[in-house]
Image (cartoon, rainbow, N blue to C red):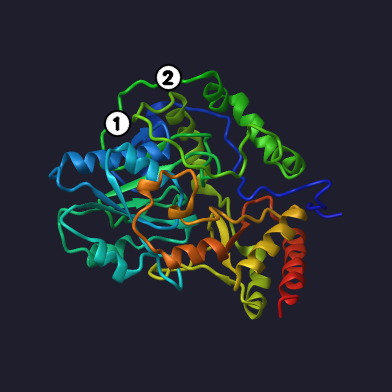
Amino acid sequence: MGAFQTLTMRALAPVRRPVPLRRGRSAEGRAQLKALLGVGQVSLFKSGTQALQAVLIHCAANQSSLRNEVILPAYGCPDLLTACLGAGLKPRLVDILGDGWGYCQASLLAALSPATLAVVAVDLLGLGDESLRLRGLITDPYIAIVQDSAQHLPRYPSTWSSDYQVFSFGRGKPLNLMGGGAATGVAQSQAVGTQGPVLRLIQSRAGALLFNAATHASIYAVASRLPGLGLGTTRYHLPEDVTAPPPRLARQLATAVPTWRQCASYSITAWLPYMAAWDEFGIRPLRAVHSVSTPTEPLRLALTAESPQLRDALVDALCNAGLGASRLYGRSLAQIDTVPAQFRGDGPYPAADWLAKHLFTLPTHAGLDEQAALMANLIIKRIAGKTR
């Protein structure tokens, strides 16, 4: 039997990047990260959320107090709101495109005002962002462009087209270090945060071993149902003060970054034989409309179904077969129950709401093999065929 078996034996996690256990010297870790990103300065933080929060605080400190609005896409991770509110700023949600990932240009231009401090360009799942387009579109020199690259990490030095870049090393991120974040253009935080016993466990080698085991296909079907692990869940978190990064972060980067540069961790190769045939069932890849190229190593394969009913039926069937499908966030930011009502924006956001109801993802990590992809293809054709 192949590497992948049925749900009773194995189940793929939506994302799986094993946590590296080896550590080196802190100075080497910082140097490796700067070389990877192709930047002269990079600062480390407790999380990607706090890295974005620090960037927004820096933006506000260098501008008039009248500029207090941060433009965010109306579909995305709730941590975008957390960072904005933690910086003491007002989130301004803007609808996305109806035919791909990116801001709706008309909605974005209408939202710009003398109160606009920054526009956050989100690289969703490694599909690409539109910071280069935004650079030409936004003529106000006092509006900062922030690339949120929490879900994408280059393997080679990149040319950045924004004022700030933000990265994350948390669970489910391209380079998983069980926590931590980085940002360019801001100073290192010297604040000291307290770590409870649970956080200390998560950030320890024991926590890394536990996560690596829990996300292995052999036991993920059981681990994902255990209370407390929170595997694959997305929640809105209350803002916190920006604190210093965990001491082990730079030491982990010293060994993790060279490995990252040498080998790909995610690939859509296993899906390529089937994707063209899915189009006849109304299942199509989500693309960043204004991105320069189509990514071959996205964090997940992002697809849209022609109806919410088809999307839900596909995700349920694929998950029951242990194939790692996901609805991602499931709702637009304005529709997430735990987000405070006063910060949900004015709306409506029809394209963001549409994407939340139609989008689903499939794994692209190294645990995916040809047998799993073949089984997923058979399930997709069977479920989608019933709707025709």
Residue 85, above or below 347: above
Tell me the amino acid under the disc marked 1.
Gln
Residue lying furthest right in this view? 1
- Residue carrying label 2: 194
Label 2, secondary structure: give it: loop
Looking at the picture, how far across and down is residue 17, in whole percent? 59, 44
Q: What residue is rendered at 57% in x and 35% in y? A: 20
Residue 251, label in figure: none
Q: The N terminus lies in which quarter of the figure?
A: bottom right
Label 1, secondary structure: give it: loop
Q: Who is closer to the viewer here, 329 or 22?
A: 329
Looking at the picture, how far across and down is residue 349, in whole percent? 41, 64
Residue 133, above or below 67: below
Tell me the CA gap for discs 1 and 2: 17 Å
Looking at the picture, how far across and down is residue 173, in whole percent? 51, 45
Looking at the picture, how far across and down is residue 110, in whole percent? 25, 66
Q: The C terminus lies in which quarter of the figure?
A: bottom right
- Residue carrying label 1: 188
Q: What residue is rendered at 66% in x and 62% in y? A: 312
Q: Quadrant of residue 28?
A: top left
Q: Quadrant of residue 229?
A: top right
Camera-near label (1 vs 2) is 2
Tell me the amino acid under the disc marked 2.
Thr
Q: What residue is rendered at 74% in x and 61% in y? A: 370
Q: What residue is rendered at 43% in x and 47% in y? A: 150
Task: Please say whether residue 36 is visible from this viewpoint.
Answer: no
Residue 45, above or below 38: above
Residue 307, above or below 195: below
Q: Who is closer to the viewer here, 307 or 164?
A: 307
Q: Who is closer to the viewer here, 381 or 217?
A: 381
The local crowd at label 1, few if under 14, some if 14 to 19, many if 20 or more residues have their Cα within 10 Å, is: some
